[in-house]
Amino acid sequence: MLKHLRIRNFKGWEDTGEIAISPLTLFFGVNSSGKSSIGQFLMMLKQTAESADRRAVLFPGDDRSAVQLGSYQQMVFNRDPKKKIFFRYAWTFPSRMEFVDPYSGEAFSGQNMTFEAEVALAAKNQPMLRVEHLKYALFDETQRPVLSVGMDRQKTKEDEYAVHSDACTLVRRQGRAWPLGSPLKFYGFPDEVVAYYQNADFVKDLNHQQEMLFRSLFYLGPLRTKTARIYSWNGIAPDSVGYSGESAVAALLAARDRKIGIKRGEMKRASPSKPLAEIVARNLLEMGLVNDFKLVPLGEHRHEYEVQVQVAGGGGWVDLPDTGFGISQVLPVLVQCYYAPPGSVIIMEQPEIHLHPSAQSALADVLIDVVQSRENNRDRDIQLIIETHSEHFLRRIQRRIAENVIGQEVVSAYFSTFADTSSRLVPLELDAYGSIRNWPENFFGDEMGDILHQSKAAMERGSGRSGDRRAVSLSGVC
């Protein structure tokens, strides 16, 4: 699970500052203020970690990727190629990392890690990137430093690096010295480090922990794919619902045997575990979108299915494409939240899109359930990073904090705005009663100003004609 993140010189951000990431982390803000860039940056790191090219420092993406960020000059702050992109993040492992130094016999163990790196163009007018610096730091459960190790580019020679480590002194093998080689991607120690030192095998575990982190990261974009009348499924379980939700139905079919329980509030027991599809159907019902939905096979030996729903307000069963657009947009959100394996980090943009206000509020309740869900009698430890424009969504979160359905420490919220030439991120100060102590000006528009000017205009229009006064009065009652 991610704990902290900081990014410098990326897109509109000169410096995000330290971002505390909670199980439910929300980003609000005006358009083009950079809030989407934070999730895009994490997805670029995931794309890089999963790329087959071990020498690509950063993989900005292509037409098959979740994000496409273009060249280094297009994604660096102010499009200044002389600037270096720096980033640091902290995360917790699912299980403790342990190793013994074969040279000294000293044991090291920890479950918390920070990583930082700085990347830059390798040469002027060249597209290749290089790592200027990378560093890992391992901590125990009390946040006591256990070990740090990293690589730095030597200023005197363009392509040479030095390894530095504390707590565990690296011992060079006997023989002729040779260059250590460049880091692999933005995070990896090259094979030469292990060959060069007698007790550096543990750096491979650090590389692995990094890859495991990004393997647990999932993304769902703001516009989900349109529905189909017939879905084919070949029996293979997809990794996720897809960047646009295109595999949501396949994921539902693949997860028929999985059961999820919901634990609401610290003092309440988890609800009895229910099939994933049943929970999704219940969520849609609670949001007022459908009365029920089902997956209908088209024949005994066919691998094709219809999704049928019983729309809210009664009536018979209809195919999914014959329902409102909001249902097709929110279905992948619900499926991804419950389908993702335990320990997942899910990034979603505008999960509330095309939903009416009451459904947006109900969706907030669903996502509270997700971060408190359980599977096989264990917490699923799902982390949600959400970009949203919904006031109704936030208001429901505030209410549930006040009602102690979810603790204030489980939620982090930020408002993205502009400051001079850079984006600026303002942490919202949520208290134990759900109140925001530093509510930004015009957070969701000038609501009181609109009410004041509406009343003023109504009074001015009604001052001359009694009929208009009556109409104004009736509209005020309505």
Image (cartoon, rainbow, N blue to C red):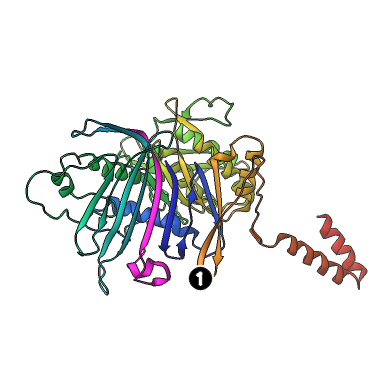
Q: Position of residue 303 (x, y in %)?
A: 32, 40
Residue 371 part of the magenta-drawn span: no
Rendered residue at 54%/26% (across/down): 271
Quadrant where the C terminus is found in the figure? bottom right
**Residue 119 appears in the rendering:** yes
Q: Above or below — where is 298 with respect to 184?
A: above
Task: Pick the residue in front: 210 or 137.
Answer: 137
**Nearer the observer, 268 or 312:** 268
Query: Circle 1 sits in a helix, a strand or a loop, which is it?
Result: loop
Residue at the (66%, 36%) spot, across then down: 403
Magenta segment, which residues?
Answer: 68-96
- Image coordinates of residue 359 in percent, x first then y, are 60, 47
Q: Residue at x 42, y 57 (%)?
A: 7
Query: Which residue has dot 1 on it?
Result: 421
Taking the image as drawn, is residue 225 in sight?
Answer: no
How busy is the neighbourhood of tag 1: few (under 14 within 10 Å), some, or many (20 plus)? few
Q: Does the magenta run of residues contain 89?
A: yes
